[in-house]
Amino acid sequence: MKPILQQVDSGMNSLISDLQKLIRQPSVSAKNEGIEECAKLCKKILEKHGIKSELLRLGKGVAPIVFGEIKSKKNPKKTLLFYNHYDVQPAEPFDLWEHPPFSGKKIGNKIFGRGSSDDKGELITRIKAVDAFLKKTGDVPCNIKFLIEGEEETGSANIDAYLKKFKKKFACDGVIWEFGYVDSKDRPIVGLGMKGLLYVELSVKESIRDAHSSLAVLIKNPAWRLIEAVHSLRDSNGKILIKDWYKEAEPLSKNDIKLINSEPFDENSFKKEFGIKSFLGNKSGLEAKKALVGDPTCNVAGFISGYTGNGAKTVLPGEAMVKIDFRLVPKMNPKKQIQRLKSHLKAIGFSDISVKVYHGEAAARTSPSDPFVSQVIDAANKSYGKSILNVSNAGTGPMYSFVNVLKAPCISIGSTYMFARIHSPNEFTRIDLLKKTTKCICHIMENFGKN
Ligand SMILES: [Zn+2]
């Protein structure tokens, strides 16, 4: 492996400049800005590194998938797939950025820009790992496939359809997930799962227009109505009160709890990062860690009604709207949960509230005993000196579709520093972590091909 790892060291300047090129091409899926251009740029970058590439399409209005493939001469029987995305979150609010969001500005050990970590930084480490093998051996230790989608930041609405349509093309024996976190002590987190998500909008329209608030004695206020409905969804400790909400939810196994217990979690620095004094329900220690991995949530993402500008305005709003995201755990079926939410509202007399569903996806986890897991842990330990095994991320990604359609284990490992401000102004990536992760990916390819 020595010459391969040396190649990673000597290729860092080119890694940085390719990453800057990717950052400088805006690709905001929420606004359909630069999507097509960025897909073409990814294809070009893959091809520049000797990886055969094509754009796959599902139809009009759907972002293309960039597919890349390189076959192994030495071991054509095993295939590793890298899942990434080339789209990014909107950069707003622009005025909070210290450097323009699409500048790719390099300062010391950091490269700033929207997508620098999420997910262009991750993508580039994988391309450069393949490149290191090709440059030094003219081969790769196993077949490599790249699946780079353009709608991850808006919820991967078409990934399931893509996976089903191009199932043969994407066939593989293992998937490396699009991102992976590195904690504040430079330990990479080997992640085995993702929670599911149900995103809904609840709204009430009481009257055809806003009214003078003196009429509050006669006209019902839709904001109050919605507050009452939302209040019925969970208790103040976060427990969801919708009937049968937890019915199929898979409890954590003894082994899961053992792994969670051994996972470090610095409560104080976490609280400091967010400027908070205590956790929901006063959780601490193992309870807090278990909740991150295994608790479903009901979160108010936004609530709007009436006047919210400066000063006072005595108004009685005509309508009110709330956006809510529910995180789901394995075995919870998003479709069933929507029905339960609707039945709940009806049962407590809130059938006037309309429910719009934006997004639903199930949770997924790879078993800690899968041999792929130990291969990735070994690679992470070799390149970082240490690593942390995480049963499930608290966030969501379309992992269920991959596990369900491709029947391959999925593991997340990557270069994203946990406080790299992804999705926020001043997102950055750390160059030292990009280098270590590229080496880690090299070790993963080697381990995967050998076993
Ligand atoms: Zn993201």
Image (tube, helix red, strand yellow):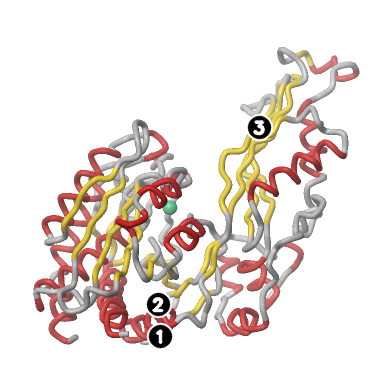
Quarter-wise, where is residue 70 in the image? Answer: bottom left
Q: Earlier in the sequence, mark 2 or mark 3?
A: 2
Residue 222, horizontal then vertical, whole percent: 77, 26
Q: Which residue is drawn at 70% across and 28% down?
A: 320
Left or right, 255 with respect to 447, comes to right
Residue 324, horizontal then vertical, whole percent: 65, 43
Circle 3 SS class:
strand
Which residue bears the numbered disc 1? Answer: 386
Q: Earlier in the sequence, mark 1 or mark 2?
A: 2
Residue 218, horizontal then vertical, whole percent: 89, 16
Distance between the alpha carbons at the discs numbered 3 and 1: 46 Å
Q: Residue at x 69, y 25 (%)?
A: 306
Distance between the alpha carbons at the discs numbered 1 and 2: 9 Å
Left or right, 170 with respect to 222, comes to left
Amino acid bearing label 1 = Lys
Give the numbered dot on residue 304: 3
Residue 181 or residue 62, whichever sits in front: 62
Amino acid bearing label 2 = Asp
Q: Which residue is drawn at 24% across and 70% down?
A: 143
Which residue bears the numbered disc 2? Answer: 186
Residue 288 or residue 372, whichever sits in front: 372
Left or right, 281 with respect to 166, comes to right
Residue 276 or residue 121, whichever sits in front: 121
Ligand 1 within 8 Å of the CB at mark 1: no
